[in-house]
C-alpha cells in the first residue's frame, strides 16, 4: 500500500533556466540574499523527512561550507552516486536504480521527499515521471551559459500552477503540481 508522500523538487534557477553558471558557479544566487529572508525554505523543510541529491551537487554544497544535513541529522539523505561508499549515519550513498528507490520510499509512511538536485537527478526523475511537484525560485538574471535545469529529451509533462510569489529582491517563486 502506498503512502501520500510526494517527491518535490525545490530549486533555484536563473530566468534563462540555469541552476549554476560556468564552472558550477553559484554566485548569482547572492543577488537575492536578504537578511531574514529564506524564501520559504525553512517552512518547506518542515514538510520533508527525506532528501535525494546527486553526488556532484552534494559535494559542491559541502565544499562551499553550507550547512547540509549530515550523519547526525533527523533527515534521511540519499546521495545518488556511481561509487559505493559506506553510509554515514542517516546519509546513504545510493548506487542502485533511482526508480526503485523512489518507489520504495513512497511505499513507506513519512513526510515528503525533497529532490535537491542537481540537474542530472531532476532530469532523471522527470524522465521517469517521478516528480510530483516543483518549486522553482527564479532569480532575476540571464546567465547565458552553465548547467541547465531542464535538458532536452524528457517526455512532455503538463504542470498546474499552485502559486506564484514575488519578493522584494526580484525573485519569483513558482509552485507547480505535475499533472
Image: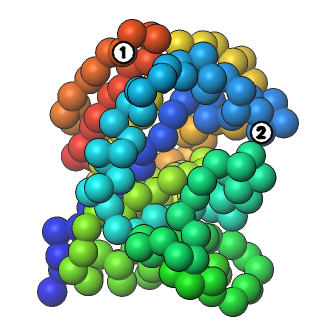
Residue 33 picture location, percent across and down:
54, 22
Picture residue at 66% right of the left edge, 59% below the top: 58
- State whether residue 164 is above or below residue 6: above
Front residue of 35 and 94: 35
Residue 142 picture location, percent across and down:
63, 13
Q: How far apart are marks 2 and 1 (CA)?
A: 25 Å
Q: What element carries label 1?
A: loop
Picture residue at 58% right of the left edge, 69% below the top: 70
Q: In this view, does 156 lie to the left or right of 148?
A: left
Q: Name the residue under label 2.
A: 24
Q: Is mark 2 on a helix, strand or loop?
A: helix
Query: Do we see residue 139 in this rendering?
Result: no
- State whether residue 120 is above or below residue 82: above
Residue depth check, mark 2 versus mark 1: number of the one nearer the observer = 1
- State whether residue 81 is above or below residue 23: below
Residue 158 picture location, percent across and down:
29, 39
Q: Is residue 173 left or right of residue 55?
A: left
Q: Mark 1 points at which residue?
A: 167
- Mark 1, other Cα within 10 Å: few <14 / some 14–19 / many ≥20: few
Front residue of 72 and 156: 72
* Mark 2 and mark 1 residues within 8 Å of each other at the beta carbon: no
- State whether residue 152 is above or below residue 97: above
Residue 2 picture location, percent across and down:
18, 80
Residue farthest right in this picture: 23
- Mark 2, other Cα within 10 Å: few <14 / some 14–19 / many ≥20: few
Marker count (numbered): 2
Q: Which mark is residue 111?
A: none
What colour scheme has been applied to the protein in the rendered image?
A: rainbow
Picture residue at 15% right of the left edge, 86% below the top: 1
Front residue of 129 and 107: 107
Amino acid at each position: 500500500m502506498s503512502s501520500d508522500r510526494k517527491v518535490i523538487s525545490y530549486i533555484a534557477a536563473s530566468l534563462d533556466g540555469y541552476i549554476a553558471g560556468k564552472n558550477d558557479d553559484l554566485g548569482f544566487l547572492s543577488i537575492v540574499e536578504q537578511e531574514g529572508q529564506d524564501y520559504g525554505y525553512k517552512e518547506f523543510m518542515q514538510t520533508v523527512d527525506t532528501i535525494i541529491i546527486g553526488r556532484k551537487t552534494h559535494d559542491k554544497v559541502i565544499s562551499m561550507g553550507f550547512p547540509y544535513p549530515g550523519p547526525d541529522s533527523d533527515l534521511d539523505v540519499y546521495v545518488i552516486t556511481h561509487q559505493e561508499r559506506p553510509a554515514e549515519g542517516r546519509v546513504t550513498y545510493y548506487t542502485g536504480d533511482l526508480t526503485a528507490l523512489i518507489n520504495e520510499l513512497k511505499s513507506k509512511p513519512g513526510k515528503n521527499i525533497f529532490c535537491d538536485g542537481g540537474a542530472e537527478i531532476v532530469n532523471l526523475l522527470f524522465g521517469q515521471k517521478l516528480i510530483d511537484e516543483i518549486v522553482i525560485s527564479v532569480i532575476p538574471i540571464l546567465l547565458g551559459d552553465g548547467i541547465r535545469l531542464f535538458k532536452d529529451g524528457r517526455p512532455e509533462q503538463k504542470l498546474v500552477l499552485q502559486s506564484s510569489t514575488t519578493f522584494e529582491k526580484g525573485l519569483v517563486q513558482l509552485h507547480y503540481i505535475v499533472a
